[in-house]
Image (cartoon, helix red, strand yellow):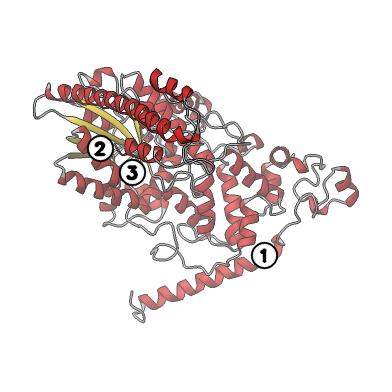
Amino acid sequence: SAWYTDILSCMLQPRNSYSPYPPIPSFPASSNTLCLGRKLSTEKTWKSIYMVYNISVISWLHNNCLKMAERQQRNENHLASNLKSFPSDAKHVVHWFRKGLRLHDNPSLRHGLNEASTFRCVFVIDPWSAGSKSIGVNKWRFLLQCLEDLDSSLRKLNSRLFVIRGQPTDVLPKLFREWGTTHLTFEEDPEPFGRARDHNISTLCKELAICVMAMASHTLYKLDEILDRNKGKAPLTYHQFQTIVAAMNPPSPPVEIVTAETIGNAYTPLQENHDEIYGVPTLEELGFDIEGLKPPVWIGGESEALIRLERHLERKAWVASFGRPKMTPQSLLPSQTSLSPYLRFGCLSTRLFYYQLRALYKKVKKAVPPLSLHGQLLWREFFYCAATKNPNFDRMQGNPICLQIPWDKNPEALAKWANGQTGFPWIDAIMTQLREEGWIHHLARHAVACFLTRGDLWISWEEGMKIFDELLLDADWSVNAGMWMWLSCSSFFQQFFHCYCPVRFGRKADPNGDYIRRYLPVLRHFPTRYIHEPWIAPLSIQRAAKCIIGHDYSLPIVNHGQCSKTNIERMKQVYQQLKKYRDNVQAGLLWV
């Protein structure tokens, strides 16, 4: 082998400056060699010692390499004999996990297991994204926990998860050939990048005579059906989307969880060193420095997701009253019933959530639930639908539904916003929580998004979207980009005159300042009167609080009153120009 050759070549090279031959290391050698080494001691005899020693080491390496080759051949023969025991038309399945990291409601996996002879479940980690700054450590930790939980569930079925590193188009075809794969299954990806990737893989599979089966289960509905009902276009208002969905049949019910009965006689061929080759990596192995990393607030995985769903559905009072939950300081903190990160990674099926919530409502209210009961899921579905055929959904340029607003470029202000250093405690506490824990309340998201874009800093929503994509556990491509376009009034929402004040909104949501004190301990000694605008506190109060504004905590980076007025005027001009453009198009003065 190349490894064997490299070792031999290294042995024949001088290793130190004072002698052409290195000292004899502690490699296994014959007793004769060691005795000879003790008897010979002069410089003239070094060459003889080295030659005898090398012969011994070469012999040892040769014998061990033969043993390794024999062991590998036995493994291959064992696998080959197992495969030969199946008929020539045996079904050897690979299920490719991406987002749907679960065994419940996984129709593509169940379909693949039907009459399968062997099956392997794989997850591919792209080395270009592992350890990159585009995905934060909390998000990677959550994903790895999801994979560990999935592997644990597969162990109970006498199988394992195969975690592979590389580009899917490079690594998967090689494994398909090695494993004799005849069928590939995966969950249908509704997003443009995923569609393109899956098309490329399917093309490669066709060349290898591999059958491909992809089924929709990440969304409630098949998005193409919604587009077909709207003349091939995505509905761009939530009301229009609801109207279309209301006329459709309910979503398909979730399929049963995969069990030993589902697998039947199929089995997963495993190697003794599976963990070394295909085990779930650690954060350190992905290149992250975990020194000082706080314990996770969120635990990833299907097991945790199902526990949280059960807790969520225990809130019968909320289901019975069916009202929008009131904003309280406690709601700003992570809840044991929150589900959004689990829906994003597919640890929890949207269809399972939909139907269990529907069943509970019927039980409590004795009536068919309104469509709006599923608001969280439907907003998610709305943004997925808007993005599915728009590869430029995450940017202004080339995005047909996005208003082209001349945003400012201000890297310094952007960095202060991202790191919680704006001088506005309400904004800074939110961004600190996001960076530390990977989650913030949806109204907190509104506050910081408005502040960055049309409210105060006039910085493009694209920049905020990138920060959220890095830090926010539940940020996926479609929903994240859609939310930022909406909150910046770049699409979907045009009431730009509604602007969140970083002081008044903070007081309303956190009247006692407990949330601010939790995430900005530098301000914890400020009286409640000044906690939301500490810069107006008298110097004596600042000294008593052991925090001098401008020294220990930042001064506000903008004057909110002035900036908000200026930015509203800017938005007016943009919309006036848009109206003029549309009028000219309708009048036939412009062609599009």
Decide if residue 254 is on the left or right side of residue 127. left
Which quadrant would the C terminus be assigned to in this image? bottom left
* Residue depth check, mark 3 versus mark 1: number of the one nearer the observer: 1
Say which of 424 and 360 sits in front.
Answer: 424
Horizontal and vertical percent for residue 127? 41, 45
Image quarter hosting the N terminus: top left
Q: Is residue 447 above or below residue 61?
A: below
The amino acid at mark 1 is Cys
Instruction: Determine the residue located farthest toward the left in the rendered image.
Output: 88
Residue, disc 1: 563
Residue 162 rendering spot, x and y as whole percentages: 33, 31
Say what amino acid the circle numbered 3 marks.
Answer: Ala
Please identify the quarter of the rendering in which residue 92 is found: top left
Residue 109 visible from this viewpoint: yes
Q: Nearer the viewer, residue 478 or 592?
A: 478
- Whether residue 220 is situated above or below residue 582 in the rendered picture: above
Label 2 to label 3: alpha-carbon separation? 44 Å
Q: Residues within 10 Å of mark 1 (few under 14, many from 20)?
A: some
Query: Quick check: can you spot residue 256?
Result: no
Disc number lying in front (2 or 3): 2
How busy is the neighbourhood of tag 2: few (under 14 within 10 Å), some, or many (20 plus)?
Answer: few
Q: Alpha-carbon neighbours of circle 3 within 10 Å: few (<14), some, or many (≥20)?
A: few
Q: Which residue is painted at 42% across and 37% down in the image?
A: 345
Q: Name the residue under label 3.
A: 246
Q: How far apart are marks 3 and 1 (CA)?
A: 42 Å
State the residue in front, 452 or 314: 452
Give the percent coordinates (x, y) of residue 427: 66, 49
Q: Mark 2 points at which residue?
A: 175
Dot 2 amino acid type: Leu
